[in-house]
Image: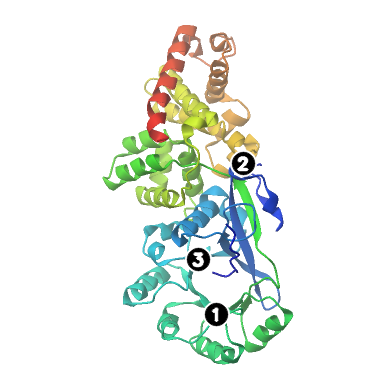
Amino acid sequence: MSERHLPRPVPRRIEVLEPDADGADPAAAAQFVYLGRQPILDRDGALHAYELLFRAGAHNYAEVTDDAQATAQVVARAIGGIGVPAVLGQYCGYVNIDRALLFNDIVHLMPPDRFVLEILETVQFDAQLARRLTELRRAGFKVALDDVSEVSDQLIAALPHADIVKIDFLETDRALLPKLVSIVRGEGRTLIAEKVETREDFALARDLGFDLFQGYFFARPQVLAAPRNRSPRPALLRLLGLLSRDAGIVELERELKLNPSVVVQLLRLVNSSAFGLGRNIASLREAILATGTRQIARWAQLLLYADSGDLPWRADPLVQLAGTRSRFMELAAQHLRPDDDEFADAAFMTGIFSLVHVVLDSTPAAMLDKLGLAPKIRDAIVHRTGPLGALLGLAEAAGEGADAARIAAAPDAPAGFHTLTAEVLADLNLSAATWFSSHIGDISQ
């Protein structure tokens, strides 16, 4: 890895924390995800890329006990938790990756034009790995060899299968540097001087012809923080089980409806640069079709890897509110338009995303614009317009114990809303609560 390891036992705005953030409140920190990023500069000192680094909390040092899980969390946070535009901007991100994840489909969640695979020094090079790196490079990925400090048989064997070599200036004998540089340069590979901590080392690296530079001399890693999205492990296992037996769209929809945070992240995945659909998503079915079951499986696997054992959903009243509200709106939509599945789907999506801004401590407009929802859903949440906006108002009133029937019977209510009498609304509320409660126990086991 391209940093020293120091052994030690808020809004959907992205926070950049200062290096002395060690004193953060642990309870507050548990509500956030963290990601480190360190600049990689070119010979003119201009930003060229970032290395993305695992951070367990607001403190600015690594606590890695499992390489695969650390990488999974970095990728999950960069793509689904914080978002690639906020983390990388227009630049590429270098991600440490171990042997297990190299051979896992999870790697294909990363758009190859935005991520560089940085092979950890602990990965043993062999013929199987050579074939896998050839496949990944053909798919568009660039491969970097990390923490190189000497000329070795391993390095000589790996060089033809890499694009970039990172030479560790803390570990490399200065007398060996010219030969090491000559061998790498002879293969036409990009050279990065990493862990550069003094002006003298920077000057030496420049004189030797290094292309890129990284280290404390230039900048310590920044820590980015964003509110945490919880993805319960049993629910992910059920989702993977459905995907593994080629379940139909109806079954996948049913499972995803029970997992609001997974739906949110699915929307981020659909709207990431990996898909570039150029259209808005109005239903879970459309999101599933647009993403494809293979990518959903990869995402679920990644979240499973990255799961950090947070509090169960039964302890989170906001999750329960999102679940019951979305189901209430779906049932009400079915009552109003029994033959219009699209309207019921849109009602469910409106309910799910009506509370996302609370979870992420942002504004509805700012949050929903990032998700690429259909305008009718966005406008229903932000402006309370249209039948979906009216349904959302009813759901809020019903949830707060207000007279929702009076609102439904008002002269300015949309057509058909008068049929949502007090008795009907009470039944819908009870059905929604029963539906969610019957599943929440299993989800939070």
Q: Mark 1 points at which residue?
A: 190
Tell us which disc is closer to us: 2 or 3.
2
What is the secondary structure assignment of the residue under circle 2? helix
Q: What residue is rendered at 52% in x and 53% in y?
A: 79
Q: Pinpoint residue 197: horizontal percent, then vertical percent.
A: 68, 75
Tell us which disc is closer to us: 1 or 3.
3
What is the secondary structure assignment of the residue under circle 3? strand
Please name the amino acid that badge 2 sits on: Ala
Q: How far apart are marks 1 and 3 (CA)?
A: 17 Å
| Classed neighbour count for the residue bearing mark 1: other residues with Cα under 10 Å, few (<14), some (14–19), many (≥20) | some
Q: In the rendered view, does 280 fall on the left or right side of 248?
A: right
For the N terminus, which image quadrant? bottom right
Q: What residue is rendered at 49% in x and 28% in y?
A: 320
Q: Mark 2 points at which residue?
A: 27
Q: Distance between the residues labelled 2 and 3?
A: 28 Å
Q: Pinpoint residue 322: horizontal percent, then vertical percent.
A: 51, 29
Q: Pinpoint residue 202: horizontal percent, then vertical percent.
A: 69, 81
| Image color mode | rainbow
Q: In this view, does 392 lie above or below 11?
A: above
Query: What's the mark number on residue 75?
Result: none
Q: Name the residue under label 3.
A: 96
